[in-house]
């Protein structure tokens, strides 16, 4: 998939420039599921940008995108691009930083290429199946285990609300070294891959939120499952636990697994 990799990287850089240019213009902001679920004209334009390029250059490939400009994907047969044009839209709207473009490319259900692009900092995290993961030109080392008491874990404080069934998060907060929340799943996947975070937890992510990051994290030995330690379905929304090896087993066993 050399040609696919080359094209994806070129399109990511071009899309990033388009997003930066949009900072000078007024955004059209709408809401989706609720008042905090934002979407802008730029989210839509960037997804259309990728969709148009993919369909022209790789007409047999399927596309699953957050904003709905791709295909109705019902199975993982063939080559599928799973795209989040702006992961962290609230950050994009309010801060003009801390948002990523996320792309995962799968072939017959196997993650082949993953990309997480930090547009503002012009930093690209990417991986090729079996060839490791990279931060720009630097190959990332394999992740090493860390104790729960020494771990820094990313998750949103939203999940600590009283209607959250996983109240074990309260115990986890007390046991770890620290917690962080960045408002972008793609960013937090990238931070686990680089060791800036030791784990990341979300109670609900969509395929475009985790597809690219999953490929990258797994290439450096990280583990991506649901909270019970079970494999995730790439085409379904799911709770997600992303972690260094060893730590992942401890988190599942001590805080999440239902016996």
Image: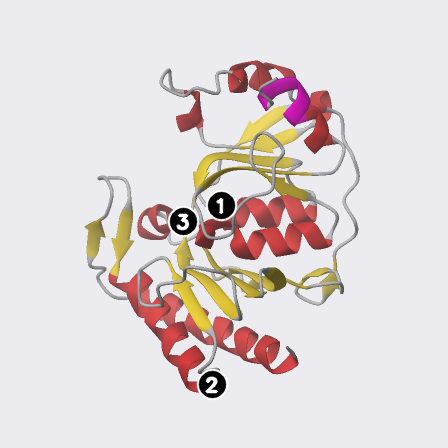
Taking the spot 74% from the left edge, 37% from the top edge, the residue there is: 245
Secondary structure of the residue carrying tag 1 is helix
Magenta-span inclusion, residue 212: no
Percent x, y of residue 169: 53, 20
Front one among 196 and 132: 132
* Circle 3 or circle 2, nearest the eye: 2
Q: Is residue 163 left or right of residue 133?
A: left
Q: Is residue 97 left or right of residue 197?
A: left
Labelled disc at residue 107:
none
Q: CA distance from mark 3 to mark 1?
A: 7 Å
**Label 1 CA crowd tier, 10 Å (few <14, some 14–19, many 20+):** many
Taking the spot 38% from the left edge, 19% from the top edge, the residue there is: 161
Residue 213 vertical placement versus 247 (above, below) = below
Front one among 174 and 214: 214
Secondary structure of the residue carrying tag 2 is helix
Q: Quadrant of the N terminus?
A: bottom right
Q: Which residues fall within the magenta stretch?
A: 251-256
Secondary structure of the residue carrying tag 3 is loop
| Res 125 visible | no
Q: Earlier in the sequence, mark 3 or mark 2?
A: 2
Percent x, y of residue 173: 57, 19
Say which residue label 2 marks: 57
Say which residue label 3 marks: 88
Q: Earlier in the sequence, mark 3 or mark 1?
A: 3
Front one among 78 and 168: 78
Percent x, y of residue 78: 53, 71
Colouring mode (rainbow / by chain / secondary structure / one colour): secondary structure
Secondary structure predominantly adopted by residues drawn in magenta: helix
Labels 3 and 1 touching (C-beta < 8 A): yes
Say which residue label 1 marks: 185
Q: CA distance from mark 2 to mark 1?
A: 29 Å
Q: CA distance from mark 3 to mark 2?
A: 28 Å
């Amino acid at each position: 998939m050399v040609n696919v990799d080359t094209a994806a990287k070129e399109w990511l850089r071009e899309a990033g420039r388009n997003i930066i240019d949009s900072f000078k213009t007024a955004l059209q902001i709408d809401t989706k599921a609720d008042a905090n679920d934002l979407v802008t004209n730029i989210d839509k334009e960037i997804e259309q940008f990728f969709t148009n390029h993919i369909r022209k250059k790789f007409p047999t490939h399927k596309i699953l995108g957050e904003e709905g400009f791709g295909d109705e994907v019902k199975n993982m047969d063939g080559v599928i691009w799973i795209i989040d044009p702006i992961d962290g839209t609230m950050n994009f709207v309010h801060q003009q930083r801390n948002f990523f473009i996320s792309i995962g490319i799968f072939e017959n259900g196997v993650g082949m290429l993953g990309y997480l692009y930090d547009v503002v900092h012009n930093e690209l995290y990417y991986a090729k199946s079996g060839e490791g993961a990279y931060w720009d030109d630097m190959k990332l080392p394999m992740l090493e285990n860390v104790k729960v008491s020494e771990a820094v874990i990313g998750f949103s404080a939203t999940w600590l609300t009283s209607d959250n069934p996983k109240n074990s998060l309260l115990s986890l907060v007390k046991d770890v070294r620290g917690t962080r929340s960045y408002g972008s799943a793609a960013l937090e996947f990238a931070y686990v891959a680089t060791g800036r975070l030791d784990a990341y937890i979300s109670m609900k992510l969509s395929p475009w939120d985790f597809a690219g990051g999953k490929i990258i994290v797994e290439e450096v030995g990280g583990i991506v499952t649901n909270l019970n330690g079970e494999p995730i379905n790439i085409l379904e929304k799911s709770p997600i636990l992303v972690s260094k090896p060893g730590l992942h087993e401890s988190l599942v066993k001590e805080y999440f697994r239902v016996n």
